[in-house]
Amino acid sequence: MEELEKLQKWLDESRSAVFFGGAGVSTESGIPDFRSVDGLYNQSYRYPPETIISRSFFARDPEEFYRFYREKMLWLDAEPNAAHRKLAELERAGRLAAVVTQNIDGLHQKAGSRVVLELHGSVHRNYCMKCHKSFDAAYVKNAPGIPRCDVCGGVVKPDVVLYEESLDDKTLREAVRRIEAADLLVVGGTSLAVYPAAGLIQYYRGNRLVLINRTPTPYDSQADLILTENIGALMGKLRA
């Protein structure tokens, strides 16, 4: 496959590649994405998913928020797939400088990646909104109804970016810095439809922009290489 060989060559030559990924990176681990035909946005609930996972809904009806969140967003048994594992290998080999991800599942770290910038937070970090004590994802998953702090009784909130909330400024600035310094930018498993995260690609200054996605994206015309295979299957074919 000519495109795969070109990607391999670029990775072999890279010393500061950055991978920017979305929900499609984790679908092969059994975690549904938000926008595909079988994703969360195409299922039926009493409220639309984008309403339920908004800050105002969380404040108004935390019990219903957590019912949805536990059922549809906490996938604690999921395991890294070939894409996560290959990215960790590339980092260890000195080819990949960072992973910038829109995912909140923690699978990049579970696979062994160390420099992971989580634009939308992580299900594995949770905190009491009153006293700020930290809790893991298992505590949230196993708590009855609304998870509450075992010290002060305050409501525990996931450290994930809900609709109506801003991205973490420190994480965003570091993602921009890494992308600006990259000699290769590989974008995978994202429709590039969610802003401000998708806009980060505009900071890439190089001429090796690779898009790996099953469907077209708004940035296809700017890409130097486009591959349409499932990202896990494709990344599994690469050498680190």
Image: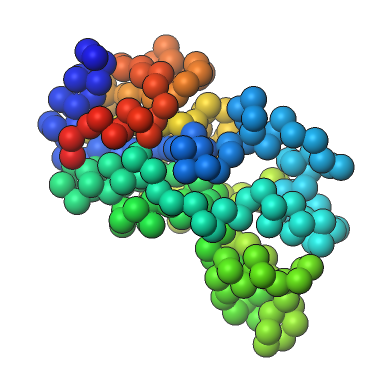
Left or right of 7 on screen, residue 166: right
User: What residue appears at the point 33 percent right and 24 percent down from the top-left corner?
Assistant: 210
Figure coloring: rainbow
Percent position of residue 237, x then y: 25, 30
User: What residue appears at the point 38 percent right and 56 percent down from the top-left corner?
Assistant: 109
Quarter location, residue 238? top left
Q: Which quadrant, please, contains the N terminus?
A: top left
Quarter location, residue 83? top left
Q: Which quadrant, please, contains the C terminus?
A: top left
- Vertical comparison of 129 with 36: above or below: below
Q: Is residue 204 visible?
A: no
Percent position of residue 200, x then y: 45, 35
User: What residue appears at the point 46 percent right and 55 percent down from the top-left corner?
Assistant: 106
- Vertical comparison of 209 with 165: above or below: above
User: What residue appears at the point 51 percent right and 46 percent down from the top-left corner?
Assistant: 103
- Vertical comparison of 69 with 86: above or below: below
Q: How many numbered marks have been drawn onto this rendered protein structure? A: 0
Q: Residue furthest bottom?
A: 151
Q: Nearer the viewer, residue 137 or 128?
A: 137
